[in-house]
Image: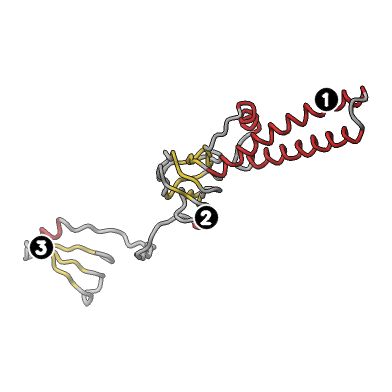
Amino acid sequence: IYGAKHLLQAPHQSDRVIFIGAQKPSDIVIELNETQVSTLKIETVVEERFVQEKHSVGNITFDQNKLVTVFAHYQGRLIDASLNVGDSVQVGQPLFTMQSPDLLTAEANLITVAGTSRMHTRNLGRAKTLVKNGGISQQAADQVIADQQSADGALKSARDNVRIFGKTDAEIDKIIAERKSDSTLVVKSPISGLITARAAAPGLYVQPGVAPAPYTIAD
């Protein structure tokens, strides 16, 4: 009870205690029995700051400005996708593997162009020897040189076409040396973050920009 000044025991009524809110007899009087008095606790009046709480209904979601939908850059069929929603990933970490007919075409062209380049390189070596010995004219030798330069340019272009798919120079050299193409394409995470959505599944045919994206990642 706030503002209490006195607790008085009534002289002729043993079962009540009179609480006087102030010193003046004209103030409000509250009568309490002994049971109520035993549970009564008197505290000093202090000022308190009450925090206003407001309740509302809403949804917790990720910052849409930091969400990245990861699509395959080329069409193909998924063959492996092991990461799940809630998994954390690092930039450059493989997300899923797919078979790409576009990659297969680019690698097949690389193997063909590399073979043509080797042939023209051998022809150039023979032409240089024949020119020295007078076996061919300078005009014929110049044509061989032009053919070799053209083949070399085509080889560089073919290597770049395969490199676009994420193949390293070592992997490209291996394809040329073994003359064996591999349609397996690994798609890696562009950012570090948390996987918030997954539509990837083995056997799913995906195309660039066609929803749903195989994976969505939040930074």
Amino acid type at circle 2 is Gly
Of residues 14 and 198, the one nearer the viewer is 198
Q: Earlier in the sequence, mark 3 or mark 2?
A: 3
The spot of residue 71 in percent (x, y) is: 51, 50
The spot of residue 86 in percent (x, y) is: 41, 44
Q: Earlier in the sequence, mark 3 or mark 1?
A: 3
Amino acid type at circle 3 is Asn
Task: Determine which quarter of the picture holds residue 157.
Answer: top right
Label 3 – label 1 distance at C-alpha: 124 Å
Q: Residue at x 23, y 64 (%)?
A: 6
| Mark 3 burial class by Cα count in 10 Å: few <14, some 14-19, many 20+ | few
Amino acid type at circle 1 is Arg
Q: Which residue is mark 1?
A: 126
Quadrant that contains the N terminus: bottom left
Q: Which residue is mark 3?
A: 33
CB within 8 Å, label 3 to label 1: no
